[in-house]
Amino acid sequence: MKGSVRGSNRAAGRLINNDDNNNNEDDESTISSTYSPILTSNAASPFHDPSSSPFAESPWSSHTNSNPSPFVDSNFSPNVLMGSLVREEGHIYSLAATGELLYTRSDSKNIRVWKNHKEFSGFKSNSGLVKAIVIAGEKILTGHQDGQIRVWKVSSKNPSSHKRIGTLPSFKDSIKNSMKPSNHVEGRRHRNGLWLKHFDAISCLSLNEDKTLLYSASWDKTLKVWRISDFKCLESIPAHDDAVNYVVAGFDGLVFTGSADGTVNVWRREMQGKGTKHFFSQTLLKQECAVTALAVNPDATVVYCGSSDGVVNFWELEKHLSHGGVLRGHKLAVLCLVTAGNLVFSGSADMGICVWRRTDSQHACLSILTGHNGPVKWLAVETDEGSGS
């Protein structure tokens, strides 16, 4: 993520991989598990200063609350660390959850699949480091350092097997578009290329509400729109003046992008005949600090933005996307955000995860989760079907 704090991490879900990087396998190879994940017990992080940080009140660090932090709701419920999945393969940079499965990607080109706290399967792409993962039904889409998107499908006969079924843009579409000079645009370092290709690393992927459109954000400053049914590139939008770090498809046909240039832009999707087109709507934020995370609450129609200064801003649709306030709970950059019902989770370079509860337009920090030894760079949540929450 450009414009953000970089460093070592053991990302949310605390996934660490534990075998050597073998980069000579085919793209479609399935990775067999040779190490069992280690479930570790609850432990306090040794990296925070109890006298100056709300981490001191984390229910994972201590089960007493004799001196409540001003950031934390005094009525919060204790949280218990259930375990850690361990496989040493470098830092974890992105997560995607669906049902009982958790997909993770690390420094290597491997994508691991976990089920019930155990490694279930995996697959590898030798075509560039994986930067982002999203799931659309039986398809897994991965954004890569080389600017391409790859599509994988779960085998109907063997759910632990994944096969690569395509690359975006497709070779056919690239050849077809290359025939017309008007399809060539100037990219980075004054190099010409096709408008439907990213010139730089893909930083983020997002699906719209009905999972018919895929949005890809890139360090090449553009936002691209893809149709899921045939994986055609519909639009390429010059979205910002610097790297686009985040994109999230929101509510009411709105799409939000955040950039290293310190801005959050809003794009409005409109139907045009049988197609769709996106138009610039407004800029929600313009600041010196890079925008490093975005998330939306589709039910409450609220959009959240994390920045490199450790602050979370939010805006509310019912108030015409006016600024709703600021959440302050981190000492370093906010690197990831995710919502679940009336809860908001923010992960940071300070190695903590703040859990916020929204009531009307007010937010209270319920707790701060600790346990990581590096920046928390990604979060994933999935509904617990057993509890209905």
Image (cartoon, rainbow, N blue to C red):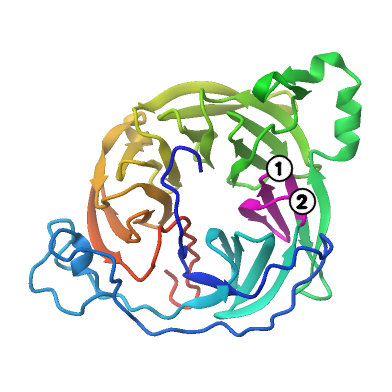
Magenta highlight range:
126-151
Q: Indicate the quadrant containing the C terminus: top left, top right, bottom left or bottom right.
A: bottom left
- Quadrant hosting residue 263: top left
Drawn side of residue 312 relative to residue 126, left or right: left
Residue 361 appearing in the image: no
Residue 319 to residue 311: above or below = above
Image disc number at residue 127 = 2
Q: Residue furthest top?
A: 182
148 vs 380, nearest the viewer:
148
Q: Position of residue 113 (x, y in %)?
A: 65, 70
Question: Could you tell me which secondary element the residue under label 2 belongs to?
Answer: loop
Question: Magenta span has 140?
Answer: yes
Residue at image position (41%, 54%) is: 339
Question: Magenta span has 30?
Answer: no
Pointer 1 residue: 146
Q: Are marks 2 and 1 in contact (CB under 8 Å)?
A: yes
- Quadrant hosting residue 44: bottom left
Q: Position of residue 354 (x, y in %)?
A: 30, 59
Image disc number at residue 321 = none
Drawn side of residue 15 relative to residue 228, left or right: left
